[in-house]
Image (cartoon, grey):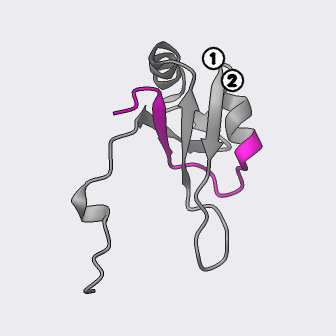
């Protein structure tokens, strides 16, 4: 498991990748920031992933930003968990 990868939930739909990266730079070096788009219209789905340079910086980011208000929404920040079988789409479906 990558202990420097963060799941960021309850993001405002108006937030962009650069905004997310800029916020988390306050906790340390950001290697990447991703906002998966909805397939239907390309808009943000309200969550994203931030990869910090180290697990120490990731833990600091969780402490700094979990339950912090960003654009009038309290975001949740946690270490990302690995995908489980429930996320895998089966070819027979």
Magenta part, dominant SS: loop
Name the residue at 63% across, 17% down. 28
Could you tell whether 50 is left or right of 14 in the image? left
In the picture shown, does residue 82 fall above or below 28?
A: below
Give whichever of 53, 36 is nearer the camera.
53
* Residue 90 lies in the magenta-colored region: no
Judging depth in this view, the residue of 42 and 74 nearest the camera is: 42
Residue 15, relative to residue 19: is it above or below?
below
Q: Residue at x 60, y 80 (%)?
A: 40
Q: Which residues are magenta?
A: 1-18
SS for tag 1?
loop
Residue 14 picture location, percent across and down: 71, 55
Q: Nearer the viewer, residue 55 or 46?
A: 55
**How many numbered markers are drawn?**
2
Query: Please, which residue is most extreme toward the front here?
Result: 91
- The percent coordinates of residue 41 (x first, y second) are 66, 77
Q: Quadrant of the N terminus?
A: top left
Residue 2 is left or right of residue 60, and the answer is left
Q: Secondary structure at mark 2?
A: loop
Pinpoint residue 66: horizontal percent, then vertical percent: 47, 30
Disc 1: CA contacts within 10 A as few (<14), some (14-19) or many (>=20): some
The residue at 56%/26% (across/down) is: 52
Q: Which residue is mark 1?
A: 28
Seen in the image, is 26 located left or right of residue 11?
right
Percent of width and height locating residue 35: 61, 52
Q: Which residue is mark 2?
A: 25
């Amino acid at each position: 498991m990558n202990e420097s990868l963060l799941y960021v939930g309850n993001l405002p739909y108006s937030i962009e990748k650069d905004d997310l990266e800029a916020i988390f730079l306050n906790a340390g070096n950001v290697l990447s920031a991703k906002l998966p788009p909805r397939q239907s219209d390309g808009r943000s789905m309200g969550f994203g992933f931030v990869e910090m340079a180290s697990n120490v910086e990731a833990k600091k980011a969780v402490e700094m930003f979990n339950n912090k208000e960003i654009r009038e929404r309290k975001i949740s920040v946690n270490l990302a968990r690995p995908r489980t079988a429930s996320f895998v789409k089966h070819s027979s479906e």
